[in-house]
Image (tube, rainbow, N blue to C red):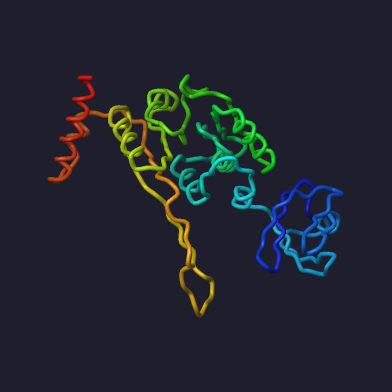
Amino acid sequence: MIPYGSLVVFVTPKGRRYIKRLEEGQDWHSNDGTLPAAQVAALDFGSETRTSLDVPIRVQEATLFDRLQGIKRQTQIIYPKDIAYICLRLGAGPGRTIIEAGCGSGGLTLGLSWFCGPTGKVVGHEAREEFFKLVRRNLAWAGAGDNVDLHHRDIAHGFAVNGADALFLDVRNPWDYLGHAACAVRPGASLGFLLPTVDQVGRLLLGLEQGPFAETEVCEILIRRWKPVADRLRPEDRMIAHTGFLIFCRRQERSEDFESRRPLGTRERKQEAARLARLDLAARG
């Protein structure tokens, strides 16, 4: 039986998916007919039932992917393909404390909350009041967020916690907050950033060069689905391509001894010389 209060996905023969909360006495109405709540509650997930118009409907449990697709949006949310990699790179999991800033509509907040579980903690920061309230509503709707400590706060004044295991910034100018970020996480912690343009990525990289950060990675994640037809397998005509640049690094104090021992080819030596020249210029002011 499906408990009342559960998020349920109704799948129609046309492939449409509707995610609804199962509430006692609140029937589901659609162009395919009506499904009484009591009829759905008597089923198990994975069952098939019929509407008042005798249309078959599949009843499925809402996964994290479904919940991410169903949250209300006032901003562009981070895509599931990016959320999965972010959670892995930040090490989101039980017992971990993850800082997030720029929560927007709460897509990544939901993902971090899901992976951190009851013993983990997500410390969110959102400066805009309308988004702060939206994140709370979306987390409550998705049945998550008990492990989320959400702050209506401008990170220009610093973060709400120190010694966190990881940090993620989805803000327009993350280079302005690198000093606060370094103080908010423990040594060796992972940091992540999301930026839409190449110019912003370049400016962030310059900022990372001047701080206690190392092991920098810049990437983008593309996903191309294939048509699941056994004898005519081919890619779909459309794909989810570039949605943003992801940048990751570690909070790591640099040492000349460590850097000097890295094997460098001709190109790498030129790049290192240019980096040192930039640092020298920045030190001179």
Q: Is residue 15 left or right of residue 85?
A: right
Can the viewer see residue 116 in this picture? Answer: no
- Picture coordinates of residue 120, whole percent (x, y): 57, 35
Q: Is residue 284 left or right of residue 61?
A: left
Which residue does the image show at 67% across and 62% down from the upper left?
16
**Up-down relation of residue 124 to residue 46 (above or below):** above
- Picture coordinates of residue 276, whole percent (x, y): 18, 31
Which residue does the image show at 51% across and 80% down from the upper left?
231
Q: Nearer the viewer, residue 171 or 184?
A: 171
Q: Nearer the viewer, residue 66 or 112?
A: 66
Q: Residue furthest left?
A: 266
- Picture coordinates of residue 200, whole percent (x, y): 36, 37
Q: How many marks?
A: 0
Q: Residue furthest bottom?
A: 231
Q: Is residue 23 left or right of residue 271?
A: right
- Picture coordinates of residue 104, whole percent (x, y): 55, 36
Q: Nearer the viewer, residue 170 or 237?
A: 237
Quarter-of-image position of residue 112: top right
Quarter-of-image position of residue 203: top left
Which residue does the image show at 46% across and 25% down from the upper left?
163
**Up-down relation of residue 281 to residue 4 (above or below):** above
Quarter-of-image position of residue 36: bottom right
**Up-down relation of residue 30 to residue 156 (above or below):** below
Can the viewer see residue 271 in this picture? Answer: yes
Q: Classify the position of the N terminus by image quarter.
A: bottom right
Q: Classify the position of the C terminus by image quarter.
A: top left
